[in-house]
Image (cartoon, helix red, strand yellow):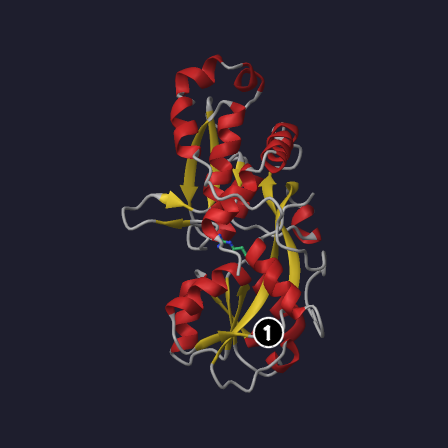
Amino acid sequence: MKLKNVAVAVVALALAVGMTACGGSASSTAASSSEAASSVAASSEAASEAASSEAASTSAAAGELTTVEAGKLTMATNATFPPYEMTTDAGDFEGIDIETAQAIADKLGLELQIDDMDFDAALLSVQQGKADIAMAGITVTDERKAVMAFSDSYATGIQSIIVPEGSDIASPDDLAGKKIGTQRGTTGYIYCTDDFGEDSVVAYDNGLTAVQALNNGQVDAVVIDNAPAKEFIAANPGLVILETSYAEEDYAIGLAKGSSLEDAINSALEELKADGTLQSIVDKYISAE
Ligand code: ARG
């Protein structure tokens, strides 16, 4: 079973009628909430402590894997994308991708090393072999597949449209002639420039700065993934998410083309899906509505 982002699935379900995805590749339809919802969050921290670097270097799994830094799984990310990756007040990384990567690293007997950078840099980092994996709520697209590889998908995403309350923008088509804020290098940027032209789209360093620009009236709408969109509007009264989504997509782990890690990553992911770990990580960060 393909794991579904529960909250997104619920939203997708609510929007299933009259959906006009005018950009991007429509993929799956709405799924029911997971039957595997677990009340216990995965304790990947505990597991990671058990997998010390000594253990990793002697483990059979690690012995067969060649990574950027021996004994480590180096992950490029952009930790401005709650609930997939963000930083705590103390400066630690947390989120669905962080814990999933930790669980994969544990399975492979590797120590997780997180490198935080801009989103477009994270995509490049893995292509250039500076990181073993890129995990950043990354959407699988044909254009990206031309320059990098992807693991099996581990979540479904939706591109959503955030507008100020009372906006005359009510559907994706209404974005025509408007200024649209996006995060640089994301599918939101790519779809909007394809559909409405580069002059209509402003690229910001991250989703939060795009949302701040919306608050300041510098753009008329922000197109961004639904899960962070929800977190941003919760923190910014006066903004709403349109009921009609813009596009649906699949998230996967980015790898270098021809990466020797692909099979090991997919096996680990498969196990984490099968034993409910992945679902419990999602449930820890996204509550079903
Ligand atoms: N899903 C979108 C994409 O792949 C946006 C991902 C942004 N992720 C992030 N960590 N900032 O283009």
* Nearer to the camera, 289 or 223: 289
Total numbered badges shown on the rendered structure: 1
Task: Give percent across and percent down for residue 88.
Answer: 33, 49
- Give me the residue at 43% from left, 35% from top: 43
The N terminus lies in quadrant: top right
Task: Give percent across and percent down for residue 259.
Answer: 63, 31
- Give me the residue at 46% from left, 47% from top: 284
Locate residue 97 relative to residue 9 in the image: left or right: left
Q: Secondary structure at mark 1?
A: loop
Label 1 within 8 A of ligand 1 by Cβ: no
Residue located beneath label 1 in the image? 243
Q: Amino acid at mark 1?
A: Glu
* Nearer to the camera, 7 or 183: 7
- Give me the residue at 64% from left, 64% from top: 12
Task: Give percent across and percent down for residue 65.
Answer: 57, 21
Task: Give percent across and percent down for residue 139.
Answer: 61, 52
Dot 1: within a 10 Å radius of its alpha carbon, few (fewer than 14), some, or many (20 or more) residues?
A: some
Q: Is residue 198 visible?
A: yes
* Nearer to the camera, 43 or 169: 43
Task: Residue 234: name its quadrant.
Answer: bottom left
Q: Is residue 2 above or below residue 25?
A: above
